[in-house]
Image: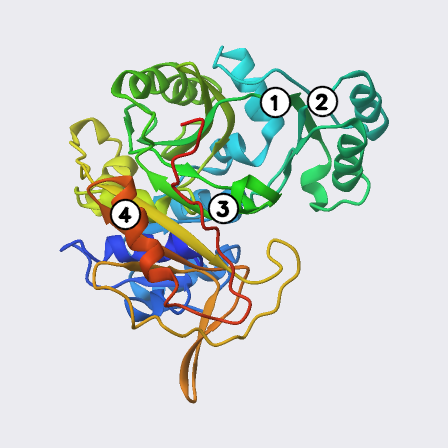
Amino acid sequence: MVVGGGAREHTLVWKLAQSPKVKEIYAAPGNSGTAQIAHNLDIKPTDIESLAKVAQEKGVELVVVGPEAPLANGIVDHFQNIGMPIFGPIKAATKIESSKVFAKELMQKYNIPCAQSTSFSEYTQAKEYIRQHSPPIVIKADGLAAGKGVTVVDSIPQALNALANIMEARAFGAAGDKVIIEERLSGEEVSCFAFTDGKTVIPMVSACDYKPVYDGDQGPNTGGMGSYSPPHFLNPALSQKITETILEPAVKAMAREKRPYQGVLYGGLIVNKDEPKVLEFNARFGDPEAQVTLPLLKTDLVDILLAVINGNLDQMNIEWSEDACVGVVMASAGYPGSYKTGFPISGLNDLDKDILVFHSGTKVVSEPWQVLTNGGRVLTVVATGKTIAEAREKVYNNITRIHFDGCHYRKDIAEIRRSQ
């Protein structure tokens, strides 16, 4: 059973379906993409009791959790209590994502390189701090905000506005009870991932994602508008440095804090002159990064997940393709603000054979049979190639064949920028 309904979960279902060990897959709730290779269940990812009940009834032997909300709500603890194998960190370990204040304090305590910052639970104190510190600075809601709780500001009025939005207007609800105000780091952003059973840490291929909604990194942040893997600037020495100074120390720190961490650890980093620093940690596969990293995985994903759960990851040899992979998100007009849904999607059958399309905000209607838009991020169109440029060209040659009313996507994903 794969818990979640986005493109990340479609990618997980697609990858798990390739394993000879897998006979049947359920997706909860899934989407019209997972419906083609799995059984969709009309259950919310946060309805843990119902998920557990159905998993037992269906004889599910492995559960994989995609999104952060069920992890933060303790889904792993619940399934462990009923004796069902589940991949993901327990609630206490998920705090590395669900509280940015906790994560920052952990990094500072264990000397994991990160941006300098101060946290606040009082609006007036935070406001005063902003008035005394000249931007650029970054303001972050403490809790889960679907990837949208971070604002980079260049002026004091902008900063005060962002702060008021989080703490006064409660744009992210209880996630804004506390805020972090930190220095803005410059450099190349990279998403680094590792499988860990709490002892052994095995890095995955890394990726770069694009958060702002418009070309040239303009406009508000989104859950991610596209990504590519591997990052061209990440050489083997730098990758090893990230593992040794960030990923491994974080897993050790969590063990020392009696919050044993098993699952995927995802470090959102910034690299400046070969010096990596942590922007934030997440407790799961990335979205849209999973869509460009999992297609490069050569080892059976089921074997890896079971090794993590059973604590014998040290016996695994995980292999990755040498290819590059690029994914571009097609979004609804208005996203990440308000948007309309229910528009028919055309062109999904007009693509080259080696193009992958992972569904996110989609649903199917049967009379007549059609795939409709059903969310902000609708599809991720993915291609692999010998080089990033080749994969990128394939994606953009095909994406124009897909259409729905108001569809929007960035035209500069995986473009080699001037700073690169």
In the image, residue 393 above or below residue 188:
below
249 on left or right of 388: right
Of the two numbered discs 1 and 2 on the same chain, state the one appearing first in sequence: 2
Give residue 142's quadrant in the image. top right
**Residue 153, image x, y percentages:** 69, 31
Residue position marked by numbered label 4 in the rendering = 391
Q: Which comes sooner in the sequence, label 3 or label 2?
A: 2
Marks 1,2: beta carbons within 8 A: yes
Residue assigned mark 1: 184
According to the image, label 2 marks what residue?
135
Marks 3 and 2 in Cβ contact (< 8 Å): no
Secondary element under disc 4, as helix, strand or loop, is helix
Q: Amino acid at mark 4?
A: Ala
Identify the mark at residue 224; answer none if there is no mark: 3
Q: Nearer the viewer, residue 301 or 293?
A: 293
Residue 83 seen in render: no
Image-quadrant location for residue 286 = top left
